[in-house]
């Protein structure tokens, strides 16, 4: 659940027209907690914990990941917070509650208030916590907050066309593939990547995606 809420009151003055929020704002101070994880707003003093999490598996060596190298962790945090200040991104660190350790990071990004759209991304977890409940729990918290609190119309994801594990994980949530943007950005090694786009609409969330993701978690099913 969110410990603070972003107001999103609907306007009902025009019958037959889809209600839109008077104000759409993603509160960067919100903390989301439940199902064994807590998403805490990223701070500068999280640098050492993020560095330790990334070192579990040397995640920065993955060509299609955006995980910072140890010496670049502070710059990574500073860039995330700068984007947050501009309203472009809301970054969290992921804390696994049983052990109390920070095990990764995730964000809302590419926020488009007029379309009530956010994307979930910049997501990574320490190797020890991949293929566990953590990813599914985080996605459920983020989607609940996006649709049920913020009143989002659509939530999106994007991933490298070479990252088949990420694509499988997103598809298992029930997201639909929107298409591929060819040569959309540069990878760590300088090659150009094709980006695969996915989304879930508010109607799809209500009509089955919510129960699908909750079911994955309750059955102990993890995304690849």
Image (cartoon, helix red, strand yellow):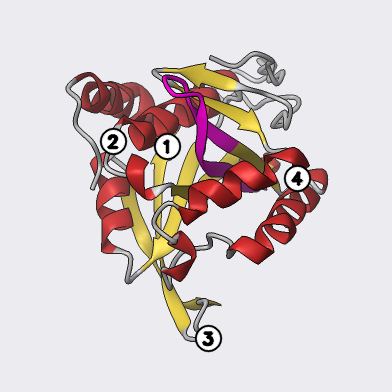
Locate residue 33 relative to residue 172 in the image: left or right: right
**On the image, numbered disc 3 is attached to which residue?**
190
Locate residue 36 relative to residue 91 in the image: left or right: left
Q: Secondary structure at mark 2?
A: loop
**On the image, numbered disc 2 is attached to which residue?**
132
C-alpha distance separating marks 1 and 4: 24 Å
Identify the magenta region: 93-111
N-terminal-most mark, 1 or 3: 3
Compared with residue 38, is residue 193 higher up or lower down, i.e. above or below?
A: below
Q: Give the residue drawn at x 56%, y 22%.
A: 32
**Disc sitting over residue 84 in the figure:** 4
Q: Secondary structure at mark 3?
A: loop
Which label sits in the foreground, 2 or 3? 2
N-terminal-most mark, 2 or 1: 2
Q: Nearer the viewer, residue 22 or 143?
A: 143
C-alpha distance separating marks 2 and 4: 28 Å
């Amino acid at each position: 659940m969110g410990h603070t809420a972003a107001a999103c009151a609907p306007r009902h003055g025009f019958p037959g027209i889809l209600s839109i929020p008077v104000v759409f704002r993603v509160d960067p101070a919100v903390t989301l907690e439940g199902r064994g994880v807590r998403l805490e707003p990223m701070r500068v003093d999280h640098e050492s914990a993020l560095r330790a999490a990334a070192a579990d598996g040397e995640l920065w060596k993955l060509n299609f990941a955006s995980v910072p190298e140890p010496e670049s962790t502070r710059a990574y945090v500073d860039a995330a917070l700068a984007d947050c200040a501009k309203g472009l991104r809301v970054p969290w660190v992921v804390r696994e509650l049983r052990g109390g350790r920070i095990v990764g990071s995730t964000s809302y990004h590419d926020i488009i208030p007029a379309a009530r759209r956010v994307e979930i991304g910049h997501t990574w977890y320490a190797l020890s916590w991949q293929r566990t409940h953590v990813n599914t729990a985080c996605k459920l918290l983020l989607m609940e907050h996006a649709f049920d609190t913020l009143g989002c119309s659509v939530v999106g994801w994007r991933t490298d066309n070479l990252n088949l594990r990420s694509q499988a994980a997103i598809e298992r949530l029930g997201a639909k593939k929107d298409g591929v943007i060819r040569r959309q950005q540069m990878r760590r090694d300088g090659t150009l990547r094709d980006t695969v786009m996915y989304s879930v609409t508010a109607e799809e969330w209500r009509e089955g995606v919510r129960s699908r993701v909750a079911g994955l978690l309750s059955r102990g099913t993890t995304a690849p």
